[in-house]
Amino acid sequence: MNLIETEIGELKTELIDMTYMVKGQIEKCIQALYTFDKDLSKEVVKNEKWVNGCELRIDSKCEHILALFNPVAVDLRFVVASLKMVSDLERIGDNAKGIAQYIVKSETPFDKELIKKFRFEEMTTVTLDMLEVLSNSFEKDNTKLARTVFAKDEILDEINNQANIIFQEYVLNEKDPQKVMQAIYFLSIIRKMERVGDYITNIAEEIIFYVKAKVLRHNKKEKAKVKNKEEDSADDDL
Amino acid sequence: MKIEVKDLSVYYGPDHVLKNVSVSIKKQTVTALIGPSGCGKSTFLRCFNRMNDLIDNARIEGEIKIDNLDIYSPSVNVNELRKTIGMVFQKPNPFPKTIFENVAFGLRVNGEKNKKVIEEKVEKSLHQAALWNEVKDKLKKSALALSGGQQQRLCIARALAVEPSILLMDEPASALDPISTVKIEELIYQLKEKYTILIVTHNMQQASRTSDKTAFFYMGDLIEFEDTRTMFTNPKKEKTQNYITGRFG
């Protein structure tokens, strides 16, 4: 293994560690919401500084590789993708913290009826699945797996889009101001969860970029094509 | 196309050192030739001014056309051909003459006797080689007193003086310090406005900075010929990727 391979290997390890760290943050804030565990929520808020620390370390590592090793081809793509992925991972961490803060702010456990109406369980299941897929596809450079998050993200988008109507109906029928306030928090949580889905999708696009040199950002056509699993098996053998 | 190479093979005795290379090179572009030592890139470069003719046992098959002229046709006058193709080598090789006489040398060999014409062409060539301002007050001094980087630019000026259309450069900056290297690279960038340039280099960054196209050779085969930007971001062949990322062997 040459020097740049070692550096790239270390960078990848740090990114994988960070992926698991933010995955843990999301898992904890979801668990905290269902169990109304304020201590766990506070832990998520506190741990955010570790996520930020990871971002700074990985940024610095990328800078170091660019300055000292002049990466090209797949190495260059990996470093460029890493800079974007680390920023998206940090934002997932921010959103986990944001969700946890709403739990801390809420005076009572979240209304089960509200959770059901907003399809929140489905949303969290899909999000956790996306994070699982993301970490596996990243570890194995498996673009076929990475592509599967695009369809899952559409489920989150749909839940988020419906949330406005559900919120409106809920607030119109609800007289208890505390429950109305909780519904406002909940709508914000839904928004944050939807953003988490977007960041996971961005990271999946970066995995495809560095492995296959295909740019899917802002390219709906190309994304639709890969969602339909064209070219998959042949490409993934590379 | 300025240069068309078709099924070019070069043999040194029994050794097949360049194997069926075909490539087309546009005029006023810079093409970088890269690959590990012994891959055939310098041999390929030397085919264009027929320098390989000077090597015992060298045999060439295939075709090289420059401006649609087959340069290996028996009717081609090699001396005339070489007037249109300048070459710069790895180590600066100025003649032990004055700066002025180094640049004027090719003109005089070509029979130019008009002093004014020679003076004009020397100045123009030194300007083109980005050396004029540094040597204009010491044209009568020995070229050997110049720094390595200046000597290399003098050799470029000498090559340009006879107004070639193609410039061959065999690792022109490998013996130079970083500042001189930058000057040579800037010069290459400027010179492509007028000349078609082929440059052999072991320096990947130099290839990526200076060239429009890159050709990667390995064990006599042309593995990949691609736009430089594509080659260094998304090479198509695994061998190319392994070489440029340093994972070779």
Image (spheres, rainbow, N blue to C red):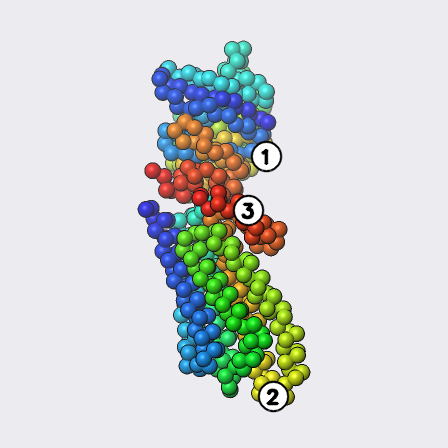
Q: Position of residue B244 (x, y in %)?
A: 42, 41
Mark 2 highlights which residue? A177
Q: Which of the 4 image quadrants contains residue A21?
A: bottom left
Q: Is residue B74 above or below residue A106?
A: above
Residue located 49% across and 22% down the image: B7
Which type of secondary structure does the marked residue at label 2 adopt? helix
Label 2 resides on the chain identified as A
Mark 1 highlights which residue? B193
Q: Residues within 10 Å of mark 2 (few under 14, many from 20)?
A: few
* Discs 3, 1 touching: Cβ within 8 Å: no
Viewer-nearest residue: B83 or A129? A129
Q: Is residue B140 above or below residue B68?
A: below
Are labels 2 and 1 on one chain?
no
Q: Nearer the viewer, mark 2 or mark 1?
A: 2
Going by the picture, which residue comes out furthest to the left?
A: A1
Q: Residues within 10 Å of mark 1 (few under 14, many from 20)?
A: few
Label 3 resides on the chain identified as A
Give the amino acid at mark 1.
Glu
Left or right: where B132 falls relative to B171? right
Q: Residues within 10 Å of mark 3 (few under 14, many from 20)?
A: few
* Quadrant (top left, top right, bottom left, bottom right) of the C terminus of chain A: top left
Q: Nearer the viewer, mark 2 or mark 3?
A: 3
Going by the picture, which residue comes out furthest to the bottom?
A: A176
Residue located 55% across and 58% down the image: A150
Give the amino acid at mark 2.
Pro
* Discs 2, 1 touching: Cβ within 8 Å: no
Which type of secondary structure does the marked residue at label 1 adopt? loop
Q: Position of residue A104 (x, y in %)?
A: 48, 82
Mark 3 highlights which residue? A230
Gap in angstroms between the C-alphas marked 2 and 1: 75 Å
Residue located 52% across and 17% down the image: B71
